């Protein structure tokens, strides 16, 4: 038995642990393992390295992917030619909805045995409790959101934190909940600039009673579409990637929104200064979290076990029963069906806030949130 392994799309915490788990489980069964460089590109161009215990044993603590990755939409006929040329019996792909949708096509159109590993910091894969990479994105974004209170409270500003997460609200919800943000500008529902401004202005004023100084911290989802504000989402010349997703620019978004809030406040007769902050690859980079390493490794093993058992169109999935979290499996068809926050009760979109239900969802893998208890000094 010979399998190929690839990582597709953006890198996340835990990818190398997944590669290690796949390789260890496969080699224990005396299977050959070919690592495909740069995702589906390697499968098209026959760019491989044979993986074994020696070259994968110590990689689980590395960030990124030792195989490289990319957003490459492959020609399936070229992939199948590579499969035939190298006598490949199955493919394991570590990826999000785009990567796994290609995997599903290979099974449905060519009956090539496949297994998926649930990877996306956006957390929008169906069929899994959470996606690998999401806990790291929440941890980093929550810390930055919490720290943004310093600039907001010290300088009497509204700090706006814009972050990766595409058009979903999972990362924004985690950042706001665990970073104690005052409000969220969501990506899954259209919003209105005037309403956002009025809400932000009200919170800015009310926080003077709470903290002794007017200030506010707002999380802005990368895919936010704000009526009254010309942003990257509405632009007609936005660049599309190979999978027809717009290349969003959270820095452009948060700068535009910051300028708009300052302008509207000046029109109101009381200028409010803002502090824009952008989080992008920081949410993906660095040493993996233990939870991503541990479940990443076990999901890698599960992928090989599913192929060995003749389960040929499945994804290793993280499941929850009460507070117990374990590795199970789900259908690839379910995995590529996007999971959105707006279909849950995790956000109060009318009030731009995360609900307690989100914390009930996230606390088994993120832990309990802290409450900010700060009082600034005020002149007599």
Image: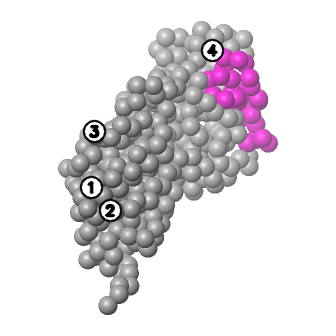
Looking at the image, tell me whether mark 2 or mark 3 is earlier in sequence order: 3
Pick the residue in front: 270 or 76: 270
Residue at the spot of label 1: 267
Q: CA distance from mark 4 to mark 1?
A: 59 Å
Is 41 included in the stretch rendered in magenta?
yes
Q: CA distance from mark 2 to mark 1?
A: 8 Å
Pick the residue in front: 143 or 8: 143
Mark nearest the camera among 4 and 2 is 2
Looking at the image, tell me whether mark 3 or mark 4 is earlier in sequence order: 4
User: SS class of the residue under badge 2?
Assistant: loop
Q: Is residue 118 above or below residue 240?
A: below
| Point 53% across, 16% down: residue | 106
Looking at the image, tell me whether mark 4 or mark 1 is earlier in sequence order: 4
Image coords of residue 358 (percent x, y): 31, 54
Residue at the spot of label 2: 271
Q: CA distance from mark 4 to mark 2?
A: 58 Å
Which numbered marker is on residue 79?
Answer: 4
| Point 35% across, 87% down: residue | 379
């Amino acid at each position: 038995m010979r399998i190929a392994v690839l990582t597709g799309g953006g890198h996340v915490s835990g990818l190398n642990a997944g590669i290690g788990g796949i390789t260890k489980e496969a080699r224990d069964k005396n299977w050959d393992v070919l690592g495909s460089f740069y995702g589906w590109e390697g499968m098209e161009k026959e760019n491989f390295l044979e993986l074994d215990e020696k070259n994968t044993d110590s990689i689980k603590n590395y960030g990124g992917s030792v195989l490289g990755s990319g957003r490459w939409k492959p020609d399936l006929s070229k992939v199948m030619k590579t499969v035939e040329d190298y006598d490949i019996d199955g493919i394991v792909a570590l990826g999000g909805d785009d990567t796994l949708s290609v995997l599903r096509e290979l099974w449905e159109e060519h009956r090539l045995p496949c297994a998926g590993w649930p990877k996306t910091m956006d957390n929008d894969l169906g069929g899994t409790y959470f996606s690998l990479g999401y806990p790291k994105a929440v941890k980093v974004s929550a810390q930055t959101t919490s720290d943004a209170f310093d600039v907001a409270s010290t300088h009497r500003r509204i700090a706006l934190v814009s972050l990766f997460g595409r058009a979903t609200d999972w990362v924004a919800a985690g950042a706001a909940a665990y970073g104690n943000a005052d409000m969220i500008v969501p990506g899954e529902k259209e919003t209105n600039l005037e309403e956002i401004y009025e809400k932000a202005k009200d919170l800015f004023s009310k926080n003077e009673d709470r903290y002794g100084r007017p200030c506010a911290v707002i999380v802005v989802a990368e895919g936010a579409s704000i009526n009254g504000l010309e942003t990257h989402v509405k632009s007609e010349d936005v660049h599309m990637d190979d999978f027809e997703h717009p290349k969003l620019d959270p820095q452009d978004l948060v700068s535009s929104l910051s300028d708009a809030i300052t302008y509207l406040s000046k029109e109101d007769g009381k200028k409010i200064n803002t502090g824009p902050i952008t989080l992008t690859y920081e949410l993906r980079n660095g040493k993996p979290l233990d939870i991503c390493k541990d479940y990443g490794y076990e999901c890698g093993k599960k992928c090989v076990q599913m192929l060995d058992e003749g389960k040929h169109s499945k994804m290793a999935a993280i499941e929850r029963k009460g507070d117990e979290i374990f590795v199970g499996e789900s259908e690839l068809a379910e995995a590529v069906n996007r999971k959105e926050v707006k279909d849950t009760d995790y956000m109060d979109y009318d009030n731009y806030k995360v609900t307690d239900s989100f914390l009930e969802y996230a606390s088994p893998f993120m832990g309990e949130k802290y409450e900010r208890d700060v009082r600034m000094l005020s002149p007599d």
